[in-house]
Amino acid sequence: MQKISKLPKFVTAQEGSPPLMKDIFSLLNECAYAKGGEVSARAHAKTLADMYLRLDKKDRKSFLQVLSFEYSPDYARLAEAFTKYSVAADIQSRCNAEIALRTVMYSPRKRILTQFNAIPAGIKFLVDLRAELLDFMKELPELNVLDSELKDCLASWFDVGFLDLVRLTWNSPAAVLEKLIKYEAVHKVASWRNLKKRLDEGDRRCYAFFHPKMPVEPLIFVNVVLTDKLEDNIQNLLDENTPSNDASQATTAIFYSISNCQYGLRGISFGNFLLKRVIDSMSRDFPKIKNFATLSPIPGLIKWMENNPEELTGACYPSDWKYLAKAGVTSPQSPIFRDIVKNPQKYFDNTELITALKTPLIRTAAKFLTTLHADGRPIDFVARFHLGNGARVEKLNWMADNSPKGVSQSLGLMVNYLYDISKLEKNIEKFTVEGKISASSAIKEMTERVSDSK
Amino acid sequence: MQKISKLPKFVTAQEGSPPLMKDIFSLLNECAYAKGGEVSARAHAKTLADMYLRLDKKDRKSFLQVLSFEYSPDYARLAEAFTKYSVAADIQSRCNAEIALRTVMYSPRKRILTQFNAIPAGIKFLVDLRAELLDFMKELPELNVLDSELKDCLASWFDVGFLDLVRLTWNSPAAVLEKLIKYEAVHKVASWRNLKKRLDEGDRRCYAFFHPKMPVEPLIFVNVVLTDKLEDNIQNLLDENTPSNDASQATTAIFYSISNCQYGLRGISFGNFLLKRVIDSMSRDFPKIKNFATLSPIPGLIKWMENNPEELTGACYPSDWKYLAKAGVTSPQSPIFRDIVKNPQKYFDNTELITALKTPLIRTAAKFLTTLHADGRPIDFVARFHLGNGARVEKLNWMADNSPKGVSQSLGLMVNYLYDISKLEKNIEKFTVEGKISASSAIKEMTERVSDSK
Amino acid sequence: MQKISKLPKFVTAQEGSPPLMKDIFSLLNECAYAKGGEVSARAHAKTLADMYLRLDKKDRKSFLQVLSFEYSPDYARLAEAFTKYSVAADIQSRCNAEIALRTVMYSPRKRILTQFNAIPAGIKFLVDLRAELLDFMKELPELNVLDSELKDCLASWFDVGFLDLVRLTWNSPAAVLEKLIKYEAVHKVASWRNLKKRLDEGDRRCYAFFHPKMPVEPLIFVNVVLTDKLEDNIQNLLDENTPSNDASQATTAIFYSISNCQYGLRGISFGNFLLKRVIDSMSRDFPKIKNFATLSPIPGLIKWMENNPEELTGACYPSDWKYLAKAGVTSPQSPIFRDIVKNPQKYFDNTELITALKTPLIRTAAKFLTTLHADGRPIDFVARFHLGNGARVEKLNWMADNSPKGVSQSLGLMVNYLYDISKLEKNIEKFTVEGKISASSAIKEMTERVSDSK
Amino acid sequence: MQKISKLPKFVTAQEGSPPLMKDIFSLLNECAYAKGGEVSARAHAKTLADMYLRLDKKDRKSFLQVLSFEYSPDYARLAEAFTKYSVAADIQSRCNAEIALRTVMYSPRKRILTQFNAIPAGIKFLVDLRAELLDFMKELPELNVLDSELKDCLASWFDVGFLDLVRLTWNSPAAVLEKLIKYEAVHKVASWRNLKKRLDEGDRRCYAFFHPKMPVEPLIFVNVVLTDKLEDNIQNLLDENTPSNDASQATTAIFYSISNCQYGLRGISFGNFLLKRVIDSMSRDFPKIKNFATLSPIPGLIKWMENNPEELTGACYPSDWKYLAKAGVTSPQSPIFRDIVKNPQKYFDNTELITALKTPLIRTAAKFLTTLHADGRPIDFVARFHLGNGARVEKLNWMADNSPKGVSQSLGLMVNYLYDISKLEKNIEKFTVEGKISASSAIKEMTERVSDSK
């Protein structure tokens, strides 16, 4: 790869002479080529990381550009290795050539990244470095080559085989629980008291994945309630005053919040494994539990309805118009209805109207959840996750999340995805191979009737 | 890569129909391409691993051949990716092309190997798999392509940054201590009582590296004695009746045994890092300790002397002949001396003779330890390790290991390598760049005088 | 002991027939006499404890009366044993008699109390039982005989030798840290954020004693700040925005809050041992720390001043009247001054006046802290604790606690008690034997001058 | 109590002047009366303990005599307190008097013993002190007064409520497992390899009680095998080559060895609680297990037979004489038979004879196990333990322990005691109240028929 024509100057870290830039290059070389031995290279990596943390944003970008383009694989050696590989005549030379090719592909920049690993908190440093890199890529898309290699490293080091499944309770370290408050992405934790409710050993469980070298940093966590039905209201679950269920009688485990914690691990999937292991663990602990399901938001619903106003229109059957008329909406052509289909959330507080719209809205949501995007995947990203894991769309819940966020995303609708262990693998195959979305018969029926009525 | 022309038949695992071979292929495909999702792929990996463990040796070889050659990178896609990379005109397309090339190089076999990671004890399965693979390679050298990829994986997963330094004591789990007995490679542990001596908290320390997912399997360990001198006799150190030194007064830490435990991790170096971290840890705990050194065997000495009989001859100075004569060896040409230089160990029990040979033998050993092999590295593999870490040859010890092994390897001679923290990096550079071996002035003098006398 | 004339009826726990009272007696008997074996007795104790927890307050009192008076030592056997003891003629019979006497004194009620020990959380049950008992004693002072025996048991089981010194940090279980908020008795913890400041690993330390069988219940804890001076302002220490000191440079450790947590352990002292062990532990960790001291409230000052108005009067020297006059207080006889000496806190917000009173008030406080109560102990209970531990009154701090509580207790004054390890034992002896309070020369001088001036 | 007339002189610990005896008294006083405060008293206790450990046996005896007789309760105060107690007219004065009496009974020697608690390893020091004391009592029986008070302390501190039930496995610390070898009292552990078999996680379990402050010292432990029948051969269980049972299919748990570890805790019973908690724990882990039983030695059998030769005679029924005659024993009057009944073990290797004696011997053993000693308890101490716990004599096993010890104790016979959880309490009551021993109908029948035949 061509070297970058003009080397950057590092400004922030220069405190005296000799110029720091020289130092950074010298340290990068020590890390990449380890002339003084592997042990010393790791010590230099520590110095380099400390230096990086003292750089300002601009200089960090320069640093990553240098790392990316000055320490790429050697083109000449790569070309030579590929040629040998192409012409290899027998198995043994082919094997040797493949090994040689792989050796050349192992870039100096990867060696440098690896050196950071052994410094204290080094793995967290790399995760945070990638988080920064992902931000810089918006402006400098060519950094993707570094990101790709760093992501490969992280994917290898954060392989699910190395992660620890940890049950978090009110007895867990405060420093860890504080992270749950920070990273909760679905339903904000208002206070430590509210957090305590979510960790109530009566009927709640919370599980997280941890990397052995990042002991106070959860990677992903899920909140579960042990209950005896498909829960249909999130505020009720989050309310500190809701009494606990009797876990020993529970038949159902509801995952009501799943949050990824490390932006720097974007694209490395843990959620599917986390749910699998939590389901396994709970099945052992609570043999009476037969159903595993979620209570999930539908973040993309309103936006999709706004872009596809005909969907709600089509979902209003003759039987619905009776009620709509009573609420003052006489026909599909009335100006108010035309506004409703485009801006349904405006009418959420109109109790009579929203009640009349209940059935059509649920039908529309069912349609939305079972419709594939042009890229062959579900439109809603939450649906994409659960259907990708082999779950099925089970049930839609009216007035299930009346928080401002819930109303603005999905008019308060939430959905249960059902994890039927015996069918996950089949569902995934049907989904990935045939593009078929699994849904309960009730949901299917709704989408069919909507189709019929159009 | 060309597919192997004739697929192997797996015999041992076939217990009924349908034939297992089909199953193995189907499982390998599931692991490589994960059509039913990542979670299921891991479950299939478990089945596959169980199957593998039921195969006999012949079938395991076939399995590894299949894994090696049927799941290699796709040649056509690789050629295409390389072409794109070669012709990339601007930075962005070069970056994209490098990413694409790397993606194609990520072989299905590597994906399969990775799947094993998440099964219980999966990482140990892979380490043992490689141990087996290394054995099979003697017969089937073309398996090196699989070995190379597996070694890369293991090197990444066993990066020193992920390892835990653990101090082992008599309070450690018996299951772990049992492994010390099993893996001790230098000075055999005769009994649990003898092991207890080596873990005596009075003046001994034992440190090991562990991988977080292999909690009862040490990767490498080192035995240390806290003392006030360069120890010069190994039997004394190992004797259960030797009284303990007062650790609080110790000035010197002697590493008297270092053993690698996992054959399947061959070529992945831990020893340098282990010594570095042990030295750091002990420097903190015992600020009075100023010297870190080894008491090491010289396993290659006798063999080298047998091949180079002129070395001992040259090391006998006129002053030595006086004593040799008294012991009945009158001249370099006498038949007995000609036999001595070729088979010195035959004469070990001849006290008078061996005493007369003491100085020449030490000179010869000094020469041996400071002589480079044709490949530019020390001949003795223990010397190679310590000199490669930046230590220097410090002192030779007469009658230091009178065990049968010690006599047969080095006529009872042992050597202290000195780890002078402030000079390790420099020594490594001098060694790797200039090919210079570090040695104490006493050792240097001996080798010079030998040279002079020739 | 006389049986109580009329046995109580237990009302609350009676849910059906047979009457519960019978059950309670039968269970008490099982626990006291263990006819079905020790193992079963413990099981019955569990039932009994569950029953007790279902009783209302009135019935609990009855229960404790029954326990107290129906299960006391047997008077007749006691009298007989004492007689034998009195007349024992030789050593052996005296020994035997003492043993027999002790056996009779071992009351059935103590056997019952001991049985509770083995139920889950039994020890906490007993601690809480005593807390309740202490309350009931206000009304039923004769329960002191039960309290005394229970206290003996608890003193034995909570002997400092069995307690664990635990350093609490932000990494401690939230369930434990929550207790710090609950039990903090000196300076209320306003929020989890404020708690985090007090656990800041930068310059704070928090140590607590735990009993092995009460793992989430601290018995007592102390907050420490590492600093380089005798801290003189508590608000500053508690403020979340106060920057951390550099602990590695600290010369002084200030104990700024000590709280007992278990009311049921009243009269069993831990504080002296806690401070001793914390001082030992910190001396090891921070060899630079030379001074250990407190920043303590003076809770009894205002009350004492109100009762002894002549003290402040006498502490106003001629030099002070200059400033007092400027603040509008012309003479000791002026009505305002007569009011001041009785209600000093009324004038706290009068800046000029309070400033004029600064020196006299400090003198008065010095007098207060070094004056013994009629019972031979310091008047102030905080002083009693620290002086009883061998500390000395070191320094008084003006405007050190301007919280409403601080003003109402001591007009914002706080005091440093100094723990000079080498003198603690001597100070205690001087204090307990001679009734002498240790104080710095500055404090002594103030009290002398106050005396002189009177 | 009378002071001892002549104070002992301590010889061993005297290394210089001033004489150590003075020191010991001064330290004892500090510990008993704590004039310099409780914290210092504990420090003095440490010095005192160190001194004690340096004394020789003779001086230790003197020390314990001093402790026993110079620090007993004050007789005058005791007499006064008892008088007040006797004359107390109302409840409150009675209560106060009882408290006062108890205070006087709390001897200075108990205060001294308690001080040792807080030194490192103090509780172990006291346990070992009592072990020594028990030995000294053989010669100085009057030390029983000290022993009694120390035992009370230990009984309180080692109350089962404070003990931890720990499952020991091959992963337990070697330092702990070493103690299992040392303390195994029933079936000697020949080697670490043999120990490993007894900890085999396949079908073995080993549980122990530990005190929180004696972490590497088990108090008592039990070995269990999971099986599907009443095991009837101990050598088979101990043999390292015996294959493991499948624990998941086990219906029966056999306790095949129980050992007390601390002689200094003699008379404080743990065994009953240990078995109870192990049974609870295993019932939870293995719901299929329905039977809990032992395979126990009968240590007193031979001795009892030797003393009661008529028992075996009576147990030989006419049907047995047929076989005895074939083995050369023609009648009860024959000299050989008269020798057999007195020295049965002499004939163990005479296969024909011993086979002919099988049924009579089993009958005799059944009789032995169900016969009460004059003191109302079973004669055999192992029987005493299990029957006292509520177990019943279930089954006798022929050739069950052919080790020299087994043959010499009980001619190779062993017995299963059955722990039927639902009947333990009843059995204990029947046993303690009515003096009835529980036995299976088979055992009962045997003893009856023996009676009949006489």
Image (cartoon, coloured by chain):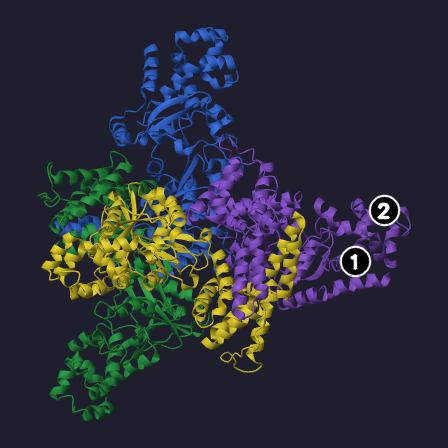
Chain colours: A yellow, B purple, C green, D blue
In the image: residue B373, left or right of residue A243: right
Q: Secondary structure at mark 2?
A: helix
Q: Nearer the viewer, residue D296 or B386?
A: B386
Q: Nearer the viewer, residue A318 or B12?
A: A318
Note whether A131 is above or below B380 in the view shown.
Answer: below
**Residue B140 place in picture, x, y as percent:** 65, 44
Q: Nearer the viewer, residue C79 or B212?
A: B212
Amino acid type shown at disc 2: Asp
Corner quadrant of residue A191: bottom left
Instruction: Residue under label 1, please give it.
Output: B363
Q: Nearer the viewer, residue A275 or D176?
A: A275
Q: Which mark identifies residue D146? A: none
Determine the residue positioned at 28% across, 31% down: D424
Which of disc 1 and disc 2 is earlier in sequence? 2
In the image: residue B53, left or right of residue A100: left
**Residue C84 place in picture, x, y as percent:** 25, 40
Do the numbered discs 2 and 1 sit on residues whose CB atoms are within 8 Å?
Answer: no
Instruction: Residue under label 2, please give it.
Output: B339
Circle 1 residues within 10 Å: few <14, some 14–19, many ≥20: many
Determine the residue positioned at 18% across, 46% down: C52
Q: Is residue D72 visible?
A: yes
Amino acid type shown at disc 1: Arg
In the image: residue B125, left or right of residue B398: left
Q: Secondary structure at mark 1?
A: helix
Corner quadrant of residue B441: bottom right
In the image: residue A423, left or right of residue C18: right
**Residue A40 place in picture, x, y as percent:** 59, 66
Q: Chain of mark 2?
A: B
Q: Is residue B206 visible?
A: no
- Whole-angstrom CA distance, mark 2 to mark 1, is 19 Å
Note whether C377 is above or below A447 in the view shown.
Answer: below
